[in-house]
Amino acid sequence: MKILIVGSGGREHAFSWKIAQSPRVTKIFVAPGNAGTAQEPCVTNINLSKIDDLVEFAQKENIALTVIGPEAPLAAGIVDAFQKAGLKIFGPTKAAAQLESSKDFAKKFMQRYGIPTADAQTFTRLDDARAYIKKRGAPIVVKADGLAAGKGVVVAQTVDEAFAAVDAMLADNILGEAGSRVVIEDFLDGEEASFIVMADGAHVLPMATSQDHKRLCDHDEGPNTGGMGAYSPAPVVTPELHARIMREVITPTVQGMAAEGIRFTGFLYAGLMIDKNNNLKTLEFNCRMGDPETQPIMMRLKSDFVDLIEHGIDGTLDQIESEWDRRCALGVVLAAKGYPQKPETGAVISRLEEATEVAREGKADAEDVCVKIFHAGTKEESGNVVVSGGRVLCVTALGDSVRMAQKNAYAAAEKICFDGKQMRHDIGNRAVARSEK
Ligand code: AMP
Ligand code: GLY
């Protein structure tokens, strides 16, 4: 069967790598993909992005099913268009994708169904927003209602910072339409976890848990990014908490959406905050897999991903189980110079081969060391692999413990060279500390 994957990041490389392992798959197209997807067996990158063009391509090529990586095409209605054309696709419709594409929709939905989340209010008028900030005090969080490519959330430590954020969004329109409405919510303290499930409108199949590292620099300092590294599983999600998240967040979300006539099919990602007393709050929903969480999650998935996706599309996720590698997986993102504000592109990337080799050095049991370099912002140019985006690579490794996965990932990540390379040196430290307590 032929598969189409839409997107160009590390998440989509991990999808194509995993899907290529399915014995049922003969051909994979990635639109537009990157230099890494192009190197996977049976993968061809195609340079299409318009929904109509993708529909036409899927019809012409007889694509058996399509999987979507990023939120933008989902929010633009790619699933509706494919379904209308009678094509199989896994993802939420435009209406269901509002869980991510409108923070106001998500917040009101959570309030209606008693899903735990921070107290919040929505504003379009600057005066009202400022008055609310003054009343609540800092720290406080200002969120643009719409999609803003990771730039829409300001965690303000002072009232003045929060004022500046609402001024920029509501008065200066720096985010355009996306920031013309803001949700202002209470600041939450604790540890974050990413809880991702596959949903078929009625049933859910949880993916392995994971944790992302959003800030650019070590010790969670510096600006927010799309994610600088991730690992799976997330030890903060104990079995007891796992059951609570399913009961208090995931199930009411899928049931609530169905009750409102907007069945949610696709990956549902709840960003959670867990405090030291194990209080649980939902920070956000995403209607897709996380990036970079997908990379360690795919490394641990032992089941045939295509089977899982088919059950997701057919509404039979209750009839299948997923199998996971017991080892830990950890991914370290290598980012371009200037990321996240102004990434510089064009640098040549070298020593990619060596990076995979080095993780094997000195290991008695070479098969036990498994490192995969997932590409994100890369492209091929005159025989070289060059930087073409903010997050460039995600070096992901398995290990018997989170410490071993960390050691393997960093051994490889440190070998890779390109001008201006940025990476964190503490991905997974929290989990290591927790597991060795
Ligand atoms: P979101 O897109 O809503 O997940 O926000 C992006 C990031 O901002 C989250 O991953 C958190 O690190 C942070 N954040 C969002 N909401 C809050 C909150 N209420 N309290 C503290 N941090 C938050
Ligand atoms: N890693 C966070 C996200 O994908 O939104």
Image (cartoon, helix red, strand yellow):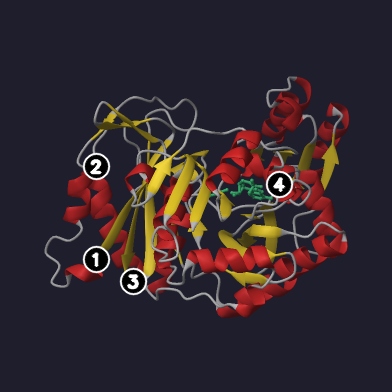
Task: Point out which mark residue 369 bears.
Answer: 1
Q: Judge from the rendering whether residue 342 lies leftward or rightward of residue 311; answer left or right.
A: left
For the residue pair 135 and 373, the one nearer the viewer reads as: 373
Q: Give the side of residue 230 with respect to residue 81, left or right.
A: left
Q: Secondary structure at mark 1?
A: loop
The type of residue carrying mark 1 is Val
Ligand 2 closer than 8 Å to label 1 CB: no
- x and y, in percent, of residue 325 in the image: 40, 73
The residue sitting at 60% across, 34% down in the picture is: 53
Q: Secondary structure at mark 3?
A: loop
What's the distance in space between the residues labelled 3 and 1, CA to CA? 12 Å
Mark number, residue 416: 2
> Can the viewer see residue 259?
yes
Do the residues under discs 3 and 2 have CB atoms within 8 angstroms? no
**Spot occupied by residue 228 in the image (x, y as percentages of width and height):** 44, 46
Verify CB contact (< 8 Å) between mark 4 and mark 3.
no
Give the distance between the C-alpha atoms of the residues marked 3 and 2, in whole angstroms.
24 Å
Q: Secondary structure at mark 2?
A: loop
Q: Write down the quadrant of residue 57 in the picture.
A: top right
Residue 401 disc label:
3
Under tag 4, what secondary structure? loop
